[in-house]
């Protein structure tokens, strides 16, 4: 067991110590502010202060961030350590303040600072330190943890570490369960009209056949997905958009449609379902309450998982709303404009409310790959997207981390606009996920 000394035990320090404990050890790191207790201990000792005490300890010279309160601009000049980036450089047995740097990234400290919004009013990935310094595509915190583990082992050969297992988690956002079915008279006529005006006669024919019931809806790939999940021994997460009104970015299937309700009922018993809070609910808390109440009524169970539609969230307000409603696990920690590691980590972690300086009970599950990012934002071909996905896969597996990917039934269906994506996904499932699926 590791004993850590600091002059003051702050909420920030305790938060990051708990994270390191969970990632590295089976037993929690003990924290003491007593020099006497620290000096007389026979345990492996870690000194997190501004001066070293002896050669028999592991010394990290702190930079002060974890002993501050409030939010201010931080000096985050990056430098190279073993061919990867780091910041908050100090002296001691480790070249930088790994606790403060990890806290900065996990707490999303920079998202509380003044910044430019993207076209949808979200925190833009171009603002982030990870993007500017070129480590967005790396789970840097986990890489640091491995380096830290090696340094501790060198100092304390008898120190025992936790053995972690790689996890591969699939998740789906059901923004629109169906492309042609259950659109209502006005939306259906409008769809026919747009297709005719653009000369898309095959689209007109397909829509008519689907409505008549002689052809499967192009977004309806649910049975096909079920077969793949069964083959891979996998239970994924499904997030359903359940906006009361189909407006703007919320174009989900109307809530009164029986087949949509049946779909949710089925997945609530077979897999794990969560709410996909609508765009509209981001401006009206009462709508979020109504959507969750409807989802729980249809699923006939408490809904404790969520992912924001369009990844629209603002810190700390969005996560506070989720906590108030009883959400326990959120899967929104990623960007909707580029793939990569928004919090620079491939492990789940508790959300720290920086404005209130407190660790919350909300667990964040960060994703690094979304098919919609690859298709709409990066304009990748299925092969390019597959190559990117496999790079993340190999990297996270090597670190025994958690690889979470996001998929859409619309892209994995049979719509000609997404030709090749269905085949790419099936290859990924059968040749890769099959061997490493995480069953929970």
Image (tube, rainbow, N blue to C red):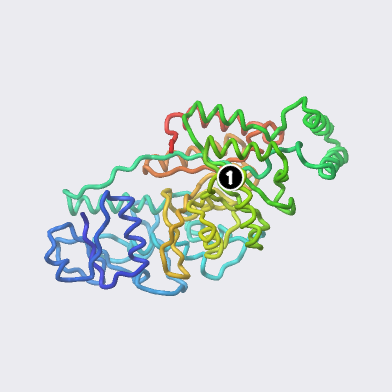
Q: Quadrant of the N terminus?
A: bottom left
Q: Which residue is mark 1?
A: 239
Would you say 311 lies left or right of 194 here?
left
Residue 38 at what x, y percent from top left? 17, 66
Residue 18 sits above or below residue 301 on the image = below
Residue 302 at what x, y percent from top left? 53, 48
Residue 154 sits above or below residue 323 on the image = above
- Element on which disc 1 rests: strand
Residue appearing at x 44%, y 49% in the figure: 138
Residue appearing at x 28%, y 72% in the figure: 8
Residue 7 sits above or below residue 420 on the image = below
Residue 422 at what x, y percent from top left? 61, 31
Residue appearing at x 32%, y 55% in the figure: 20
Would you say 223 lies left or right of 357 here?
right
Would you say 340 lies left or right of 19 here?
right
Residue 243 at what x, y percent from top left? 68, 51
């Amino acid at each position: 067991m590791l004993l850590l000394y600091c002059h003051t035990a702050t909420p920030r320090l305790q938060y990051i110590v708990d994270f390191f404990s969970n990632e590295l050890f089976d037993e929690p790191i003990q924290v003491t502010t007593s020099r006497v207790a620290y000096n007389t201990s026979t345990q492996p000792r870690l000194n997190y202060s501004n001066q070293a005490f002896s050669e028999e300890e592991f010394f990290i010279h702190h930079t002060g961030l974890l002993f501050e309160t409030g939010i201010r601009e931080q000096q985050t000049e990056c430098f190279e350590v073993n061919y990867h980036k780091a910041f908050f450089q100090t002296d001691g047995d480790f070249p930088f303040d790994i606790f403060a740097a990890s806290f900065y990234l996990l707490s999303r400290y920079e998202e509380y600072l003044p910044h430019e919004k993207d076209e949808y009013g979200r925190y833009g990935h171009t603002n982030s330190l990870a993007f500017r310094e070129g480590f967005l595509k790396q789970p840097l915190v986990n890489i640091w943890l491995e380096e830290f583990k090696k340094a501790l082992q060198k100092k304390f050969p008898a120190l025992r570490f936790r053995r972690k297992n790689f996890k591969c988690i699939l998740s789906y956002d059901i923004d629109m369960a169906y492309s042609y079915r259950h659109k209502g008279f006005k939306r259906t006529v409008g769809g026919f009209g747009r297709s005719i005006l653009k000369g898309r006669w095959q689209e007109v024919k397909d829509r008519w056949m689907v409505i008549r019931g002689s052809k499967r809806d192009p977004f309806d790939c649910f049975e096909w997905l079920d077969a793949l999940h069964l083959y891979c021994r996998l239970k994924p997460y499904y997030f359903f958009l359940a906006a009361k009104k189909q407006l703007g970015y919320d174009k989900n299937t109307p809530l009164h449609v029986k087949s949509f309700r049946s779909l949710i009922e089925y997945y609530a018993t077979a897999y794990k379902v969560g709410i996909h809070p609508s765009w509209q609910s981001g401006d009206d808390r009462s709508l979020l309450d109504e959507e969750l109440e409807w989802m729980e009524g249809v699923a006939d169970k408490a809904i404790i998982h969520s992912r924001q539609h369009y990844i629209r969230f603002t810190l700390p307000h969005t996560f506070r709303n989720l906590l108030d409603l009883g959400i326990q696990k959120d899967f929104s920690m990623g960007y909707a404009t580029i793939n990569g590691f928004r919090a620079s980590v491939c492990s789940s972690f508790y959300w720290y409310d920086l404005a209130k300086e407190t660790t919350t009970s909300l667990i964040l599950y960060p994703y690094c790959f979304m098919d919609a990012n690859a298709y709409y934002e990066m304009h990748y071909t299925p092969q390019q997207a597959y190559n990117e996905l496999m790079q993340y896969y190999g990297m996270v597996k090597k670190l025994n981390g958690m690889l979470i990917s996001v998929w859409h039934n619309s892209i994995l269906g049979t719509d000609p606009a997404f030709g090749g994506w269905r085949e790419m996904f099936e290859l990924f499932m059968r040749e890769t996920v099959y061997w490493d699926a995480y069953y929970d």
